[in-house]
Image (cartoon, rainbow, N blue to C red):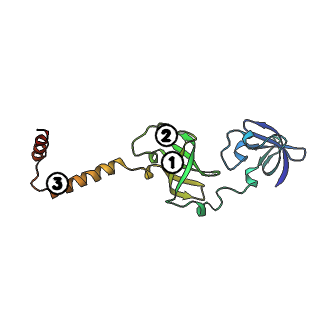
């Protein structure tokens, strides 16, 4: 680890002085969490600790990381999040194949589009919006790949199962009322109207 000082910010990262030489901390290396713009994480003149990732002598470029100097949010994630857990999270990003939901600071899981709702949806935007708080069920935790699969659908009542249950109850009533006809029911209703 090297001490440095943020010299200037760009859309794609921060240039850090490490003893007379500037290196670039790419936006993806500023934090373990998703960063929209570098000024959300660092400011010019700020003292930071960095790790040298690469030195390109031909192009006179040094790649640095602040993220690598910080404890990762994924360290020991298996102890914090387990399959079957129900958590509350915030929708961070919507993409064509699903939604990324932050369930712990710096830890996002994917709710695949097929796990958003029981009804068919074309895009996640039909049901969700960025910044929305949602309850999710953990389907799978892959520590090695730093991936968590989540479901919103598993926490919702399945309308098809409810219809099946209602039908089963209807059938049970029909079996218990042997000899009872639809005409009897209609006749009873008509008699009440008289």
Q: Which residue is more in the foreground, 155 or 181?
A: 181
Q: Earlier in the sequence, mark 3 or mark 1?
A: 1
Q: Earlier in the sequence, mark 1 or mark 2?
A: 1
Q: Which residue is more in the foreground, 27 or 92?
A: 92
Q: Position of residue 144 (x, y in %)?
A: 60, 59
Q: Which residue is more in the foreground, 176 or 72?
A: 176
Quadrant in which the C terminus is drawn:
top left
Residue with the mark numbered 1: 111
Residue with the mark numbered 2: 124
Mark 1 and mark 2 residues within 8 Å of each other at the beta carbon: yes
Q: Which residue is more in the foreground, 178 or 11?
A: 178
- Residue at the spot 65% in from the left edge and 51% down from the top edge: 106
Q: Please tell me in which quadrant of the rendered image residue 17 appears.
A: top right
- Residue at the spot 85% in from the left edge and 42% down from the top edge: 45
Q: Earlier in the sequence, mark 2 or mark 3?
A: 2
Question: What is the spatial separation of the Cα atoms under label 2 and label 3, in whole angstroms?
Answer: 42 Å
Q: Position of residue 60 (x, y in %)?
A: 83, 41
Residue 62 is left or right of residue 159, and the answer is right
């Amino acid at each position: 680890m090297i001490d440095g000082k943020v010299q200037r910010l760009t859309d794609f990262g921060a240039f850090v002085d490490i003893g007379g030489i500037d290196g670039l901390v790419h936006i993806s290396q500023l934090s373990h969490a998703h960063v929209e713009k570098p000024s959300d994480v660092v400011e010019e003149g700020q003292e930071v600790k960095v790790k040298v990732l690469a030195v390109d002598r031909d192009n006179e470029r040094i790649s640095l990381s602040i993220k690598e100097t910080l404890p990762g949010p994924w360290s020991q994630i298996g102890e914090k999040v387990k399959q079957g857990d129900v958590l509350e999270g915030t929708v961070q990003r919507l993409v064509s194949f699903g939604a990324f939901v932050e369930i712990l600071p710096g830890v996002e899981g994917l709710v695949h589009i097929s796990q958003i709702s029981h009804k068919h949806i074309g895009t996640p935007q039909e049901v969700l919006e960025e910044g929305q708080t949602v309850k999710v069920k953990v389907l799978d935790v892959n520590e090695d790949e730093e991936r968590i699969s989540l479901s919103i659908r598993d926490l919702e009542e399945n309308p098809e199962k409810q219809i099946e249950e209602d039908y089963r109850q209807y059938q049970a009533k029909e079996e218990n009322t042997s000899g009872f006809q639809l005409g009897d029911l209609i006749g009873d209703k008509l008699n009440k109207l008289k």
